[in-house]
Image (cartoon, rainbow, N blue to C red):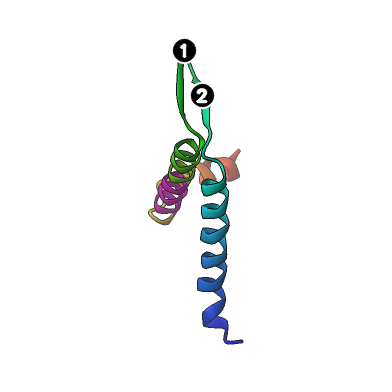
């Protein structure tokens, strides 16, 4: 098996597993967030959670790539102490 096919294959398996879980959980659930209680289909809750996790991961990845987080000067201050 060629190595360049491994990453897309793993990604495809993860997406298929996520879609399977989402489709099997369609019943309405009550969701409590801070002081608000909302009733929504479980499929919507799982989709929103997966989307939020994806966006958070992309944001952290972008911040680390730009060297915004962790701050470079924090390492120098830790060495001097």
Q: Label 2 neighbourhood size at 10 Å, few (<14), some (14-19), many (20+)? A: some
Disc marking residue 61: none
Q: Is residue 35 above or below residue 17?
A: above
Residue 81, quarter of the rendered image: top right
Nearer-the-camera pick, 40 or 9: 40
- Residue marked by disc 1: 35
Most distant residue in the bottom direction: 2
Q: Which residue is mark 2?
A: 31
**Direction from residue 55 to residue 30 in the image, left or right:** right
74 inside magenta stretch = no
Mark 2 to mark 1 CA distance (whole Å): 11 Å
Q: In the image, residue 44 lies at what x, y percent?
A: 44, 38
Instruction: Locate the N terminus by quadrant.
Output: bottom right
- Image height check: is 67 above or below 47? below
**Considering only vertical position in the picture, is 70 above or below 39?**
below
Q: Find out whether the residues at labels 2 and 1 contact each other: C-beta distance under 8 Å.
A: no
Where residue 53 appears, as percent x and y from the top left, is 48, 44
Residue 76 at x, y percent in the picture: 52, 46
Question: Residue 59: where, in percent of width, then height?
Answer: 40, 47
> Quick one: SS at disc 1?
loop
Give the number of the mark in front: 2 or 1.
Answer: 2
Q: Secondary structure at mark 2?
A: strand
Q: Name the foreground residue: 41 vs 11.
A: 41
**Residue at image x 52%, y 48%?**
23
62 inside magenta stretch:
yes
Q: Please, is residue 75 above or below residue 2 in the view?
A: above
Asked which quadrant contains residue 56, the reply is top left
Query: Quick one: 79 or 24, which is closer to the camera?
Result: 24
Give, as a single range, the part of the protein colored magenta: 54-64
Magenta segment main secondary structure = helix
Task: Count how many numbered circles sit on residues in the image.
Answer: 2
């Amino acid at each position: 098996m060629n190595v360049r096919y491994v990453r897309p294959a793993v990604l495809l398996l993860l997406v298929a597993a996520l879609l399977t879980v989402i489709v099997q959980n369609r019943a309405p659930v009550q969701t409590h967030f801070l002081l608000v209680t909302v009733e929504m289909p479980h499929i919507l809750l799982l989709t929103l959670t997966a989307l939020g996790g994806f966006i958070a991961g992309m944001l952290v990845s972008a911040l680390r790539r730009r060297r915004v987080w962790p701050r470079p000067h924090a390492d120098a201050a830790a060495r001097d102490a």
